[in-house]
Image (spheres, helix red, strand yellow):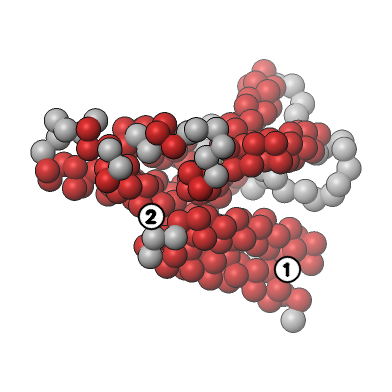
Amino acid sequence: MKKHLPNALTCLNLLCGCLALLFIFRGFPVIGAGLVGVAAVADFFDGLLARALRVSSPIGKDLDSLADMVSFGVVPGAILFHLLEISLDSGGQLVTADLPDLGRGLLPVLGFTVTIFSALRLAKFNNDTRQTSSFIGLPTPACTLVVAALPLILADDRFGLRGFILNPWLLVGLTFLLSGLLVADLPLFALKFNNFHWLGNRRRFIFVGLAAGLVLGLRAAGVPLAVLLYVALSVPGRVRSRVGLPQ
């Protein structure tokens, strides 16, 4: 039975993604964002459990990518679509007044650009032998956590960010930025703990500690900053690899 436990977690990831879509399209993006968090936890532990039990398989890898495509591909596109619609209904039409009616109607569809690039990212990951112990490009769960944090920030707008987040051009710009990072030739360290020794996991422990502090201190607003920190902490490793120094 143990060989099926990681796949069960992967299926939980997929189920959470499906339920998240249901709630987002029914107008409850905060619940959808919460389900994304559960999906991310399941996605993290399915790989960890597979490595611990030594039951990795090609089917498990393919199932993981298929589940990720829903939870971390379609879901962020749906959230951006929803937020772009809200931005136009809550005054965003003032900054898109120069667009024809058709253009304003199609603007929310741009949110699904993230979905397309997530598919490209996952396809590259499955066929890129360089990504066995690290990532090339922003992982889809990290991209999705940034997007899922937005409705949570709006629901608890303690920092007065509503007008900033609901600017349609900011949302479109964020969509294109995340889409580019997903397929960028940008080496990033993986949060895969084969053991819990400090040696070999230093950056992972530093990131987890600082990210936890950001989220505890800033709540949902700390999530995008944590992802930015993740990218920033990956830069020294890239520099060392280019000059031939040990990681």
Foreground pick, 183 / 37: 37
Residue 93 left/right relative to 148? left
Residue that badge 2 annotates: 78
Q: Position of residue 212 (x, y in %)?
A: 73, 40
x then y, percent, for residue 5? 71, 73
| Mark before the other along the chain sequence, 1 or 2 | 1
Q: Is residue 78 left or right of residue 245?
A: left
Q: Which residue does the image show at 30% across and 42% down from the upper left?
A: 90
Q: Residue at x 77, y 48 (%)?
A: 193
- Which x, y percent locates residue 247? 75, 29
Residue 63 location in percent, x, y? 54, 67
- For the residue labelled by badge 1, is the local secondary structure a helix, a strand or a loop? loop
Q: Residue furthest top?
A: 243
Q: Secondary structure at mark 2?
A: helix
Please give the name of the residue rendered at 37% of the width and 38% of the height, measured from the top-left corner. Answer: 166
Q: Quadrant of residue 209?
A: top right
